């Protein structure tokens, strides 16, 4: 109440450092990583860099992608509510692409960890849609960031025997998404009914099924579970110019949440690798400042 009539403090956090949930806040156009979240298995300075790009780097990409979904499309770079900056054509195309995710996740069932007789619970593709799209964006951004920043060693053997650095990075995505949770039957049931996030086992696999680079990095046979004929992709990355663009076409211009203007793509800015790397340093500074 003491803050009710005071100017908005844009540096304030709406959660304490002990919170376990990083988030994107469209009203401030900012991403927050509370200190308590920055622990293993998601983040640890002892972990190989490639793994960190897949774990915490993926989470950063996930939160960043929220700035470009429905909620992010209705705020400007300061977080002020504006008319949706998607053009009508883009909004229609975005919605059409999003329907692929909704249908796909509606067809997925989540299972408890230790009940082999369970028939599982259907994931709600509509309830989890924004998070599923952000998961897909997070994977793509983390991969782009790592392959760009460490291109000279990305294909070299990693600390994990038999795996390249890029494979380790992608395995880090799975780790970051699942948090290696053991889930009871009641927990899974409650999660699919109420949570906007799909259960961890789903989040740790489906975004990687949708990401073609995973199949090529691990040589998954065409038509296998991790290299399906049909994929859902809303955002795509381009290694040659280090860009992250919409997987749908649109025309017209738009000035969006990150303050960028683009004539034919919704650019997250060209050098995603440096952007994510900068976030890691800022994040560490925040941790030391806030704790
Ligand atoms: Zn999210």
Image (cartoon, grey):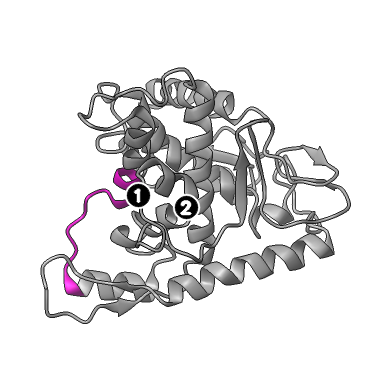
Q: Is residue 134 left or right of residue 89?
A: left
Task: Find residue 288 and report its image quarter.
Answer: top left
Q: Residue at x 24, y 24 (%)?
A: 159
Q: Is mark 1 within 8 Å of ligand 1?
A: no
Give coordinates of residue 30: x percent, y percent. Answer: 59, 39
| Image disc number at residue 135 | 2
Q: Does the CB distance between marks 2 and 1 fall below 8 Å?
A: yes
Q: Residue at x 22, y 82 (%)?
A: 119
Query: In the image, is residue 177 part of the stretch drawn in magenta?
Result: yes
Q: Could you say whether the residue bearing mark 1 is in a helix, strand or loop?
A: helix
In this picture, which residue range is highlighted in magenta? Answer: 174-185
Query: In the image, is residue 96 part of the stretch drawn in magenta?
Result: no
Q: Is mark 2 within 8 Å of ligand 1?
A: yes
Q: Is residue 23 left or right of residue 199?
A: right
- Given residues 21 and 233, the one toward you in this image is 233
Task: Find residue 18 and report its image quarter.
Answer: top left
Give coordinates of residue 277: x percent, y percent. Answer: 50, 24
Res. 2 visible in picture? no
Q: Could you say whether the residue bearing mark 2 is in a helix, strand or loop?
A: helix
Q: Residue at x 25, y 21 (%)?
A: 46
Label 1 belongs to which residue?
177
- Given residues 108 and 130, the one toward you in this image is 108
Q: How many marks?
A: 2
């Amino acid at each position: 109440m003491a803050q009710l009539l005071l100017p908005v403090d844009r540096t304030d956090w709406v959660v304490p450092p002990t919170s376990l949930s990083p988030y994107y806040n469209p009203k401030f156009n900012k991403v927050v990583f509370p200190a308590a979240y920055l622990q293993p298995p998601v983040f640890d300075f002892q972990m190989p860099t490639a793994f960190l790009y897949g774990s915490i780097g993926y989470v950063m990409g996930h939160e960043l992608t929220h700035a470009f979904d429905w909620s992010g499309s209705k705020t400007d770079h300061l977080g002020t509510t504006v008319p949706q900056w998607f053009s009508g054509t883009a909004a229609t195309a975005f919605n059409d692409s999003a329907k692929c995710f909704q249908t796909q996740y509606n067809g997925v069932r989540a299972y408890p960890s230790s009940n082999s007789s369970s028939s599982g619970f259907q994931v709600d593709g509509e309830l989890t849609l924004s998070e599923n799209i952000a998961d897909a964006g997070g994977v793509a951004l983390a991969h782009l960031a790592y392959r760009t920043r460490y291109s000279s060693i990305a294909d070299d053997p990693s600390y994990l025997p038999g795996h390249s650095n890029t494979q380790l990075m992608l395995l880090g995505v799975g780790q970051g998404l699942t948090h290696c949770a053991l889930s009871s039957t009641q927990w899974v049931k409650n999660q699919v009914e109420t949570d906007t996030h799909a259960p961890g086992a789903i989040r740790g696999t489906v975004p990687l099924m949708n990401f073609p680079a995973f199949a090529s990095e691990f040589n998954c046979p065409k038509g296998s579970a991790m290299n399906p004929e049909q994929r859902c992709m809303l955002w795509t990355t381009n290694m040659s110019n280090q860009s992250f663009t919409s997987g749908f076409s649109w025309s017209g211009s738009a000035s969006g949440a990150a303050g960028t203007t683009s004539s034919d793509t919704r650019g997250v800015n060209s050098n995603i690798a440096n952007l994510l790397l900068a976030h890691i340093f800022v994040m560490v500074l925040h941790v030391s400042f806030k704790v």
